[in-house]
């Protein structure tokens, strides 16, 4: 009998990128692949203790190579059967191009893990993508399912790679047949996705992001829609009717005659013929001939964007027969995640918010939308070649003081001074200077917010380090 593990059994595997995802792939494959090479272009990467004590492991079938130019070394690809590339590795490096020229498969970890799941396991998957809100939605879905007594794991781009949920014992009986996998999926992961076919896909929104990697908004948008590409009438897809780009793309796919999943549509507008809609502090839905109503008064998730997130989270739960009262109870008990319009309290009578997770302009627009014109806003960071014009147009309604930091500060400054604006503009070299200035110029009772609209890697390891630094600076005095 053919095993689902035959695709890796005795194969020679190259893993490119030795972050969390790459290391998880190696650990899972060590007992199956005949030979594994793991490479990373960070020659200072500390892997001591990762594999039984040192880089020079006791595994005779594993070789680790670190070096700044390692992604250029085509000799590494010789006799390799399969390449697995980590999400953070660009798809156009010479090593990947050479593999493709020689018809060597190049997969993402998502693709590899998917092919190692049984058919029964694949039928219990929920995959979430979108520019903003992914982590909130997958976490809330996980909470709803777990609160209802379901066996559920949240994984993917959120931190736990999908490969780590794969049971590598092939005994005929599936030990995880009841496990529901809720998978956060990024555009980077979708670049090398070929057979991934979740039972439920969720597309939250598509706005400009990662243009430095994907070269154009259209390429980025096509990758997000790719989540639907293998689904058919036996599957489901939850989509945001309020996102015009998503609707346009689906209409185009429908006209092409491709088989599509059953759609569950959600909208903030009650008149949109949606399956889920919002009215009078309640979310109403009708799905599989069942009606439901979820109250949203006095919940911790604030803002219209979070109402959309709740609808997207409730849809797969209702689809899988979790009742409205159970869904509502989980929503009421759910606290906003750190670094997402996170209320920090008062400092010098100023209300302070940490929104470090807003790493693109549209996320910042959403973050400031529910405030009056009362914000001292700290923005800026790594420039991902994004269009800030929409953000600049939105600032005038909400911002009294704008503080610019980071690599993108000159670009945003040039746009702002050319626009009609009635707020003051400051430029600071560091986040420390920005926080100090913010506390000086913000009036008591008003708002100081970090919502950078940019990635963090010009100044920080990631958005979490940036947000935690903001918190410590506020309360260190």
Image (cartoon, helix red, strand yellow):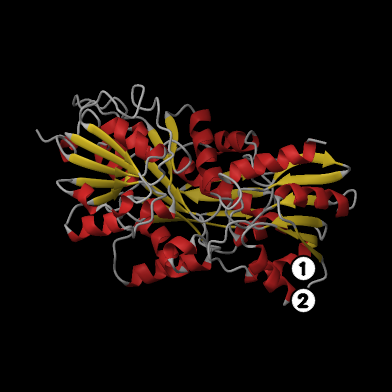
The residue that appears at 35% across and 25% down in the rendered structure is 54
Q: Where is residue 26 in the image (x, y as percent from the top left)?
A: 30, 34
Disc 1 packing (10 Å; few <14; some 14–19; many ≥20): some
Say which mark, if any, is on residue 396: 1
List x then y, in percent, for residue 459. Answer: 61, 50
Identify the residue shown where x is 56% and y is 45%. Answer: 462
Left or right: 327 as drawn, with respect to 184: right
Camera-side residue of 20 and 237: 20
Q: Which residue is drawn at 89% across and 52% down?
A: 443
Q: Quadrant of residue 373?
A: bottom right
Count up the numbered dots. Answer: 2
Q: Is residue 359 left or right of 121 when viewed as pictured? A: right
User: Looking at the image, is mark 1 or mark 2 earlier in the sequence?
Assistant: 1
Circle 1/circle 2 CB separation < 8 Å: yes
- In the structure shown, which secondary structural element does the residue marked by tag 2 occupy? loop
x%, y% of residue 7? 17, 40
Relative horizontal placement of residue 131, taking residue 151 as reference (left or right) = right
Q: Identify the residue under disc 2.
A: 420
Does residue 108 appear left or right of residue 335 in this picture?
left
Q: In this view, does 176 lie above or below 314?
A: above
- Secondary structure of residue under mark 1: helix
């Amino acid at each position: 009998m053919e095993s689902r593990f035959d695709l890796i059994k005795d194969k020679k595997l190259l893993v490119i990128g030795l972050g969390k995802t790459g290391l998880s792939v190696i650990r899972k494959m060590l007992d199956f692949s005949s030979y594994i090479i793991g490479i990373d272009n960070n020659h200072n990467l500390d892997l001591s203790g990762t594999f039984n004590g040192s880089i020079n492991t006791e595994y005779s079938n594993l070789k680790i190579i670190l070096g700044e130019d390692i992604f250029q070394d085509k000799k590494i690809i010789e006799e390799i059967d399969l390449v697995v590339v980590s999400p953070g590795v660009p798809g156009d490096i010479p090593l990947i191009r050479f593999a493709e020229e020689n018809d060597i498969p190049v997969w993402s970890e998502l693709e590899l893990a998917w092919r190692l799941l049984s058919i029964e396991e694949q039928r219990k998957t929920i995959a979430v993508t979108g520019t903003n809100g992914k982590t909130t939605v997958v976490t809330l879905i996980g909470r709803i399912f777990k609160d209802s007594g379901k066996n559920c794991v949240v994984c993917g781009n959120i931190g736990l790679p999908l490969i780590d949920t794969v049971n590598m014992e092939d005994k005929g009986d599936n030990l995880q047949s009841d496990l529901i996998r809720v998978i956060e999926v990024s555009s980077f992961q979708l670049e090398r996705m070929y057979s991934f076919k979740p039972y439920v896909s969720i597309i939250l929104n598509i706005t400009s992001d990662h243009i430095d990697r994907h070269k154009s908004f259209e390429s980025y948008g096509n990758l997000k829609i790719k989540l639907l590409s293998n689904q058919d009438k036996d599957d489901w897809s939850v989509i945001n009717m309020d996102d015009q780009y998503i609707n346009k793309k689906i209409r185009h796919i429908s006209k092409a005659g491709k088989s599509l999943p059953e759609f569950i549509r959600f909208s903030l507008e009650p008149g949109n013929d949606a399956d889920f809609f919002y009215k009078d502090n309640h979310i109403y839905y009708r799905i599989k001939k069942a009606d439901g109503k979820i109250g949203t008064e006095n919940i911790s998730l604030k803002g219209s964007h979070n109402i959309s997130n709740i609808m997207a989270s409730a849809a797969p739960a209702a689809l899988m027969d979790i009742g409205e009262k159970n869904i509502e109870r989980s929503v009421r008990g759910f606290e906003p995640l750190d670094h997402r319009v996170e209320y920090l309290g008062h400092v010098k009578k100023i209300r302070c918010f940490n929104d470090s997770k807003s790493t693109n302009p549209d996320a910042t627009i959403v973050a400031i939308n529910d405030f009056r014109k009362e914000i001292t806003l700290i923005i800026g960071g790594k420039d991902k070649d994004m269009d800030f014009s929409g953000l600049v147009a939105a600032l005038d309604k909400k911002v009294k003081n704008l503080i610019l930091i980071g690599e993108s500060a000159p670009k945003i400054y040039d746009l702002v001074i050319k626009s009609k604006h009635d707020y003051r503009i400051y430029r600071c070299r560091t986040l420390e200077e920005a926080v100090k200035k913010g506390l000086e110029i913000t009036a008591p009772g008003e708002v100081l917010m970090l919502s950078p609209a940019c990635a963090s890697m010009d100044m920080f390891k990631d958005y979490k380090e940036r947000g935690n630094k903001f918190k410590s600076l506020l309360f260190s005095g």
